[in-house]
Image (cartoon, rainbow, N blue to C red):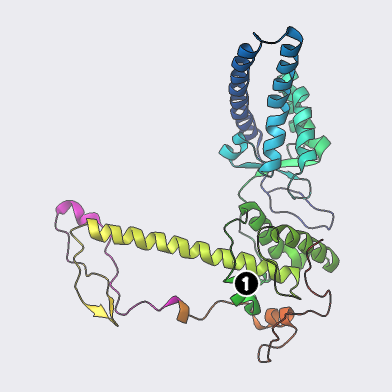
């Protein structure tokens, strides 16, 4: 784990990237850059026959800068802190407070990399990384960034953090109609991490960070109902996204199980039905000695409960009352309101 602490005194659960993984990611990026330089050299060789030497020299400089500086700066900006090498190793560049990097951070890191990586053969970068507890090289010091592992652990979430991840019941119907296919994974992860830690922050800091995250999410997801606070909006989006991911995994497992039943002669269906739906086939024993190691499939005695008839998971009563301003047994108005901030409104 890292010892990153943001200005509000909240420690971030981020795993710092070690020097070997960073070096391997840099080598992969270097191979990509060498390939790009080779392609540009061939193009320049074809173009130089039709232009004068000054133009050819200028094109060579532009291509070199585009590969050495433009490649990492552009990719880290577009992918929120990752290059091709970092994607392969599961690394990411983040700000010192754990937030995503901007173009200025990526540009400073790329420009500094010309000196502490290429001109010094990486010696300066290695020395500065060993001198830093967080493994920062010169570019990270100047840009205010740090390289971490992309996959943050879910362990250590308190009961209050888990309650904040639950679906606010008044927003359940609205969330089920959302299109979440374009929501980036890293933004959804940031919203989840905020919800699990917001109870540890000061109220004003939690409100400001929630508003900033909600402003980012609203670029990909529809606006919430009027009067919805930012934290409830983020909780509804992340909870619905998690439910859909679990359903997709369940559908894949069911499809794999059906394919195994169709391809394996050892699984013979009993032909009986329960409530009009076919029951799971009974185990008849392996038809071949080689199939003796197959797992015994479960036999359902009743049809599975329809998803639509199940009681949806929702937040506890005190969380619902926080969102709506009403007790659970009271009538909830159509427009969710809050007496404090008037709900989330995206910036104009």
Q: Nearer the viewer, residue 166 or 187?
A: 187
Examine the rendering and report whether any part of residue 120 can be seen. no
Q: Is residue 210 above or below residue 100?
A: below
- Secondary structure found at label 1: loop
| Residue 257: x %, y % from top left | 32, 61
| Residue 108: x %, y % from top left | 80, 34
In the rendered view of the protein, which quadrant contains the C terminus? bottom right
State the residue position of label 1. Answer: 166
Q: State the extent of the magenta-drawn residues as a range.
A: 284-307
Badge 1 local density, few (<14 within 10 Å), some, or many (20+)? many
Q: Nearer the viewer, residue 52 or 21?
A: 52
309 relative to 95 in the view: left or right: left
197 relative to 178 in the view: left or right: right
Quarter occupied by residue 165? bottom right
Residue shown at 83% from the left, 66% from the top: 202
Quarter occupied by residue 345? bottom right
Q: Is residue 255 above or below residue 42?
A: below
Residue shown at 25% from the left, 61% from the top: 261
Residue shown at 73% from the left, 80% from the top: 336
Tell me which secondary structure the magenta stretch mostly adopts.
loop
Residue shown at 66% from the left, 58% from the top: 220
| Residue 190: x %, y % from top left | 68, 56
Instruction: Check the image and name the residue furthest to the bottom.
Output: 330
291 relative to 227 in the view: left or right: left
Examine the rendering and report whether any part of residue 242 can be seen. yes
Q: Nearer the viewer, residue 3 or 152?
A: 152
261 in the magenta segment: no
Q: Nearer the viewer, residue 50 or 338?
A: 50
Numbered-mark total = 1
């Amino acid at each position: 784990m890292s010892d990153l602490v943001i200005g509000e005194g909240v420690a971030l659960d981020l795993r710092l990237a070690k020097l070997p993984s960073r070096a391997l990611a840099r080598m992969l990026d270097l191979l990509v850059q060498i390939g790009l330089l080779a392609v540009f050299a061939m193009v320049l060789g074809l173009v130089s026959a039709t232009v004068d030497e000054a133009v050819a020299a200028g094109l060579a400089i532009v291509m070199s800068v585009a590969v050495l500086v433009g490649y990492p700066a552009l990719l880290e900006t577009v992918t929120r802190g990752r290059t091709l090498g970092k994607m392969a190793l599961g690394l990411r560049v983040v700000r010192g407070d754990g937030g995503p990097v901007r173009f200025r951070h990526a540009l400073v890191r790329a420009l500094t990399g010309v000196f502490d990586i290429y001109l010094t053969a990486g010696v300066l970068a290695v020395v500065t990384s060993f001198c830093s507890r967080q493994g920062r090289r010169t570019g990270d010091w100047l840009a205010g960034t740090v390289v971490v592992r992309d996959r943050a652990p879910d362990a250590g979430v308190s009961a209050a953090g888990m309650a904040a991840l639950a679906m606010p019941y008044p927003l359940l119907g609205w969330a089920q109609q959302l299109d979440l296919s374009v929501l980036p994974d890293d933004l959804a992860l940031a919203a989840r991490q905020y919800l699990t830690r917001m109870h540890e922050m000061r109220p004003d800091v939690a409100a400001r960070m929630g508003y900033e995250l909600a402003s980012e999410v609203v670029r990909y997801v529809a606006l919430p109902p009027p009067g919805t606070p930012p934290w409830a909006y983020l909780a509804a989006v992340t909870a619905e996204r998690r439910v859909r991911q679990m359903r997709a995994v369940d559908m894949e497992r069911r499809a794999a199980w059906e394919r195994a039943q169709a391809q394996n002669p050892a699984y013979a269906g009993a032909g009986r039905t329960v409530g009009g739906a076919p029951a799971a086939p009974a185990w008849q024993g392996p038809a071949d000695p080689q199939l003796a190691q197959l797992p015994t499939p479960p036999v359902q005695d009743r049809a599975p409960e329809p998803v639509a008839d199940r009681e949806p998971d929702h937040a506890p009563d005190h969380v619902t009352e926080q969102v709506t301003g009403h007790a659970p047994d009271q009538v909830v108005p159509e427009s969710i309101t809050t007496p404090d901030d008037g709900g989330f409104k995206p910036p104009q």
